[in-house]
Image: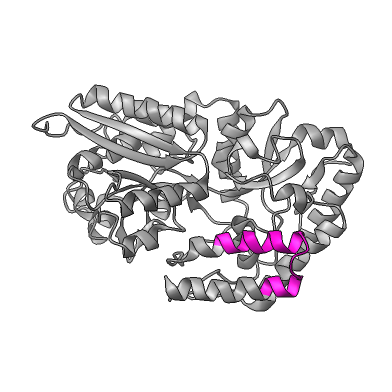
């Protein structure tokens, strides 16, 4: 997928003058110095029950090899609610030691001085990144500083119900599917299925699809200064496309859409509820979604545009609170997750494909059918010509923009506001969000 840091490159980046030349060895974790007494760390993250299960397996393995350190975890299934809960904990002086972080929010928490600069731990190799994918690492930096270790990388995908597609019997998935072809195909799907199942979810409020679409126009959502890069015409064209999808019955009616796909997990998914054939997700989510349905699921890239819009996204990062009393122990755990053989196997690729070469090699022989499909998709997209690197970090306020995109989409879909009025609302609100953050 990309080249990896060698010792000279890491030293040149100022991240590791103490990096050893022999790499990860047998994918084992360096033995930390023993703390004086029992230590309890608290970790928070969002995700499905599958992620919770795998994470607890990894924390138990860490406790076995570091018996004086115990990690308790709190999971929130709802992505939006997670940030509300995290902000409440921080405001009450209960900032968790270990925080799962997203690239759309990391700048905001760096600005608030919530996250610890990990440079010193990378420099002394407490966190060993010797063979880590530089593309993943670069995409997780804020002001050229690392505040979280990427736990995996993913590509955007349109996950689809392969079983329903076969039942519809309208022909195979179109190759080189443009947005116009996607509209025609999903319209036919709705007609062919005729059982209340729509061709696709209404993705007008999906920030992932919107970003890919904007990038396919040769733009980015934001510029290097953190200002909104898309314009009013872009917003109007996007909402108008989905208005046309609704009128063609190609997508799920907003009266239903507004009540599903809230958490981003299988439990309230329009896809696993068999309400739609297509939905927008990330490649790592196939495992949890496949486990939640008897239908066979598969992945395809989002509809294509005039220029590449997809990019390898740091799926999630593990950050350390600046206020933690145990920064070294937290760093040891971060290192454990990406380098220890047992932890790598426990986490698998549910959070994305690992950044470490040796971790990937370790997992390959043990991947189940669904995990192999994820790895195959990653490799296919990497070589497809549909991607280009994302070089602009989301500014503080990006999370608010994502929320506004969805809220406005619902208002349009429910007839509360016109397409032009919604486009103006999105554009002006996005500008305010990034300016005030």
Give the x, y percent position of residue 54.
Answer: 44, 28
Q: Is residue 238 above or below residue 17?
A: below
Does residue 341 show up magenta in the picture? no
Camera sees residue 362 = no
Q: Look at the image and tell me whether residue 359 can be seen.
A: yes
Residue ID at (35%, 46%): 99
Quick one: which residue is furthest to the top in this view? 64
Name the residue rendered at 23%, 24% in the picture: 65
Give whichever of 391, 134 is nearer the camera: 391
How many tags in the picture? 0
Judge from the rendering whether residue 168 lies leftward or rightward of residue 256; answer left or right. right
Give the side of residue 402 with respect to residue 204, left or right: left
Between 412 and 290, the one nearer to me in the picture: 412
Residue at x 54% of width, y 65% of height? 401
Give the image location of residue 342, x and y in percent. Answer: 35, 25
Residue 400: where, in percent of width, then height?
51, 63
Dividing the picture into quarters, in which one does residue 347 lie? top left
Name the chief secondary structure element in magenta: helix
Segment tinted magenta in the rendering: 402-423
Residue 403 is a magenta residue: yes
Q: Residue furthest left?
A: 36
Q: Where does the image place residue 101, in percent across and percent down from the top left?
A: 40, 50
In the image, residue 282 above or below residue 368:
below
Figure check: 8 above or below 226: above
Q: How is the image coloured?
A: one colour
Q: Is residue 373 above or below residue 13?
A: above
Q: Residue at x 31, y 24 (%)?
A: 61
Q: Quadrant of the C terminus?
A: bottom left
Looking at the image, which is closer to me, 310 or 270?
270
């Amino acid at each position: 997928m990309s080249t990896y840091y060698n010792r000279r490159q890491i030293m040149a980046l100022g991240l590791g003058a103490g990096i050893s030349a022999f790499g990860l060895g047998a994918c084992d974790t360096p033995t930390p110095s023993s703390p004086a007494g029992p230590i309890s760390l608290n970790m928070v993250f969002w995700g499905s029950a599958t992620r919770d299960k795998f994470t607890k397996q990894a924390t138990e393995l860490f406790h076995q090899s570091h018996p004086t350190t115990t990690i308790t975890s709190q999971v929130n299934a709802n992505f939006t609610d997670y940030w509300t809960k995290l902000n409440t904990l921080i405001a009450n002086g209960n900032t968790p030691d270990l925080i799962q972080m997203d690239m759309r929010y990391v700048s905001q928490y760096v600005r608030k001085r919530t996250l610890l600069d990990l440079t010193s731990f990378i420099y002394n190799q407490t966190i060993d990144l010797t063979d880590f994918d530089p593309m993943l690492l670069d995409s997780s930096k804020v002001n050229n500083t690392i505040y979280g270790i990427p736990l995996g990388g993913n590509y955007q995908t349109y996950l689809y119900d392969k079983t329903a597609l076969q039942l519809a019997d309208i022909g195979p998935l179109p190759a080189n599917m443009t947005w116009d072809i996607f509209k025609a195909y999903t319209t036919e799907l709705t007609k062919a299925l005729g059982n209340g199942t729509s061709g696709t979810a209404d993705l007008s409020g999906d920030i992932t699809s919107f970003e890919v679409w904007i990038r396919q126009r040769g733009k980015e959502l934001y510029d290097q200064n953190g200002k909104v890069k898309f314009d009013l015409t872009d917003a109007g064209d996007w909402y108008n496309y989905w208005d046309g999808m609704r009128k063609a019955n190609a997508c799920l009616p907003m009266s239903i859409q507004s009540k599903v796909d809230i958490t981003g997990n299988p439990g309230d998914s329009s896809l696993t509820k068999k309400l739609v054939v297509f939905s927008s997700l990330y490649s790592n989510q196939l495992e949890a979604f496949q486990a939640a349905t008897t239908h066979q699921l598969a992945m395809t890239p989002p509809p294509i545009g005039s220029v590449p819009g997809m990019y390898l996204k740091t799926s999630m990062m593990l950050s350390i609170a600046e206020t933690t009393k145990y920064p070294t122990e937290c760093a040891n755990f971060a290192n454990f997750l990406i380098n220890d053989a047992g932890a790598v196997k426990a986490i698998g690729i549910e959070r994305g494909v690992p950044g470490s070469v040796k971790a990937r090699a370790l997992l390959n022989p043990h991947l189940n059918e669904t995990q192999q499909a994820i790895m195959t998709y990653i490799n296919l997209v990497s070589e497809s010509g549909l991607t280009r690197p994302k070089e602009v970090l989301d500014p503080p306020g990006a999370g608010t923009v994502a929320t506004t995109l969805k809220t406005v989409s619902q208002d349009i879909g429910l007839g509360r506001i016109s397409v032009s009025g919604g486009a103006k609302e999105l554009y002006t609100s996005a500008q305010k969000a990034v300016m005030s953050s």
